[in-house]
Amino acid sequence: MKKSVVPIDEKFENHDFDLFNALAALDKKDYGYYDRLTQEQQKKFVPYMLLMWMSAVKGNKDLQNYYVSSTDYYANKYMFNENVQKHPKLQWLMLCAASPSLGKQFHQWIPNISPSISKLKIAAKVKDINDYYAKIYPKLNKDTLQELATDFVVNQKRKIYLSQLYPNYKIEDIEVLNQLITDMDIEQYEKDRGND
């Protein structure tokens, strides 16, 4: 009896992991895609990259909102858990779960804010944040973008101040503290310290 040979799809014959083929498979909710990758391709699977690309699609606002919230709910919250990181197939399945299975979408890369800014190492500049928001929200008018960027810079300046005041706190703790403490609290604290 002859053993039947399953034909290998050409895209699985090369050794590179093709990001765009993977995104197309995610759009189709192809749960078996990861299993069909070669071992070399599986080694080149980078969940973080897929997460960033997966969450941003061009299209109507409802579809964009769905992809962002679904990717966050099904994948982003758990993707970097120390136990989940050990299982790339599970990470693939989580990304598949986030897809609405509406066919191929146009995914785009959304850049991150500089790590130095997000880790409160350097102060953000309104122009840089404005440019960043313009890429994320291309349909917002200039005044709204400017307002968002200015608000971000003011908040980030407070967080830097708090992180210097409490150097042993984690960034998450500084975020919470920033929500609890008002500008008036900071002014009063500085007055009490003799820094009016």
Image: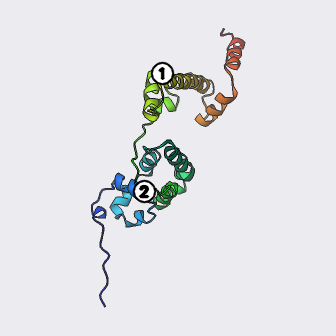
* Three-letter residue code for mark 2: Gly
Q: What element carries label 1?
A: helix
The tag on residue 84 is none
- First along the sequence among labels 1 and 2: 2
Q: Nearer the viewer, residue 65 or 18?
A: 65
- Front-lying residue, 89 or 146: 146
Q: Position of residue 54 (x, y in %)?
A: 45, 49
- Neighbor class of circle 1 (other Cα within 10 Å; few <14, some 14-19, many 20+) is some
Horizontal and vertical percent position of residue 190: 67, 14
Closest to the observer, 6 or 37: 6
* The disc label shown at residue 103, or none: 2
Q: Nearer the viewer, residue 116 or 124?
A: 124
Q: Which residue is drawn at 30% across and 56% down?
A: 16
Whether residue 125 can be seen here:
no
Q: From what the image shows, is residue 18 above or below residue 111?
A: below
Residue 126 has which mark?
1
Please, what is the three-letter code of the amino acid marked with disc 1? Val
Q: Is residue 174 visible?
A: yes
Image-quadrant location for residue 173: top right
Disc 1 versus disc 2: nearer the observer = 2
Residue for point 36% across, 55% down: 44
> How many other residues sit within 10 Å of disc 2, few (<14), some (14-19) or many (≥20)?
few
Colour mode? rainbow
Asked where in the image residue 186 lies, by quadrant, the reply is top right
Q: Where is residue 80 in the image (x, y as percent from the top left)?
A: 52, 50
> The N terminus is located in which quarter?
bottom left
Horizontal side of residue 158 vs 194, given as left or right: left
Q: How far apart are marks 1 and 2 (CA)?
A: 38 Å
Count the labels in the image.
Answer: 2
Question: Is 64 rendered above or below residue 161?
Answer: below
